[in-house]
Image (cartoon, grey):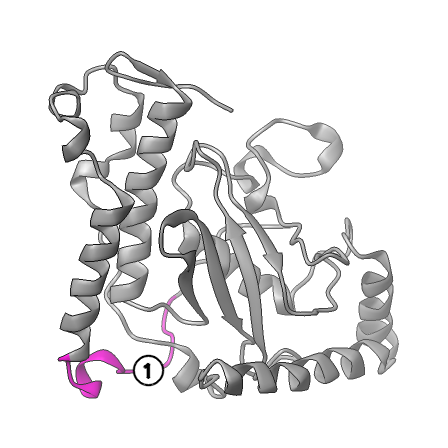
Amino acid sequence: MSSVTRGGKTGAAGASHHAVRVLMQEFQLLQKEPMEGFRVKLLKEDNLFEWEVAIFGPPDTLFAGGYFRATMKFPQDYPFSPPSLKFTTKILHPNVYDNGTVCISILHPPTDDPRSGELPSERWNPTQNVHSILMSIISLLNEPNTSSPANVDASVMYRKWKEKGDKGYENTVREQVNATKADAVRDGIVVPQTVEEYCIKNSPLKKDPSLDMNDFFQDDYEDDDALSEDEEPTLNSFTAKRKEDEKVLETKTPESTNKRSKQTDSTVPDRT
């Protein structure tokens, strides 16, 4: 685990504190301003380091109408190290291992490994976030990387389908999509079916100036170091704040919270 220096506080404790702050901000923003194609929630109310993710299959693809659940686990030194994502819903895909773990460049540590075939710029860096990860995975669903597959059998089936019209891959994926519909009903989820439903018009994620990435590398944290332990961000304070936000959201009209429009401009980070 990387060590982070924070005004005299060095090591895992300081790193964990920063991770909690960043994860609090990301989670709150995604709850207030849901993004296209996915939803997130905490696996446990008292643990910000494990999220439950629901990814909706993008329209006009084999995965359209699918409701794919996954778990996302964050390291104690996030965002300096990437999280991991593992599908708990059965999914056949060239870049998903049999156990559900996703293999994608954006989730690989930022090391320079010529043998990997990945450029350092394609790997994880601290400017990435949950949104960029999930949008990359959604893009990957329909555009897999078959040159370095995690699931060789799925990669062979996919190439036969694309190059020779073999229906094995298509039929299996459609069966899996249909199987997820019961999960969606049980969880009370309405899966978007059209592009208009899939793409939510929201303002861009707002960056909290107090969480400037450059701050994490500075030794001078006079304001933070002046705080007592009781004033540090805590999971209890986060949970209480989230419940307050939920009450506010409940008072909003559907028109103000569910406006949907066609996606006009989305930029997805490079990935292999």
Residue for point 79% across, 79% down: 172
- Location of residue 156 in the rendering, given as x and y in whole percent from the top left corner: 87, 64
Per the image, label 1 sits on a secondary structure element best described as loop
Q: Nearer the viewer, residue 101 or 156?
A: 101
Residue for point 48% across, 37% down: 75
Q: Is residue 198 a member of the stretch shown in magenta? A: no
Residue for point 49% across, 53% down: 133
Above or below 6: residue 86: below
Say which amino acid is labelled 1. Ser
- Location of residue 182 in the rendering, given as x and y in whole percent from the top left corner: 59, 86
Q: Residues within 10 Å of mark 1 (few under 14, many from 20)?
A: some
Q: How many numbered marks, from 0 up? A: 1
**Residue named by callout 1:** 261
Q: Is residue 263 a member of the stretch shown in magenta? A: yes
Determine whether, in the image, residue 156 is placed left or right of residue 141. right
Residue for point 26% across, 83% down: 259
What range is drawn magenta here?
A: 251-265
